[in-house]
Amino acid sequence: MPVAMDAKKGPTFTIEVKDENPIWVHCEQVDHCPSGMVFAVNAPKKGNTFKKFLKAAKKSGKDEYHDGGSYRRSDEDAEEDIEEKRSLLSRITGKRDVVEA
């Protein structure tokens, strides 16, 4: 959704969720998840709360990258890193099918 550079407020919109189960969402963009870029819909007030989910996301670690360039990782290393993050987030949500944004 485009937003003017000088906008004082961002756009708002409404999404109807026809599900009462928790929906956990995190961002895999570099440094977003560890910076707290996560959200949940219908997060429980007790047990696996949003607060615990956010804490787990912030503990997921910083990705390594270089400004203006890239680095190579083997497919095996990349898959292992992704699986490690999914495991950490799924432990807090109790689900393996954590939505990726």
Image (cartoon, rainbow, N blue to C red):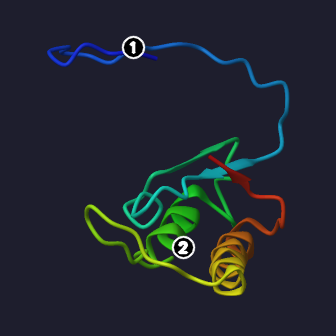
Q: Which residue corresponds to the image point at 37% horizontal and 61% vertical from the top-left? A: 35
Return the x and y of residue 77 as percentages of the image width and height. 64, 86
Q: Which badge, 2 or 1, is on the more N-terminal residue?
A: 1
Kind of element beneath mark 1: loop
Residue 56: image tag: 2
Q: As shown in the figure, which amino acid type bears the numbered disc 2?
A: Ala
Q: Nearer the viewer, residue 89 or 63?
A: 63
Judged by depth in the image, the label closer to the viewer, 2 or 1, is 1
Picture quadrant where residue 46 is located: bottom right
Residue of label 1: 11
Few, some or many C-alpha atoms within 10 Å of disc 1 (few <14, some 14-19, many ≥20)? few
Picture quadrant where residue 68 is located: bottom left
For residue 51, above or below residue 76: above
Q: Nearer the viewer, residue 66 or 41?
A: 66
Return the x and y of residue 59 as percentages of the image width and height. 46, 78
CB-based contact (under 8 Å), mark 2 and mark 1 = no
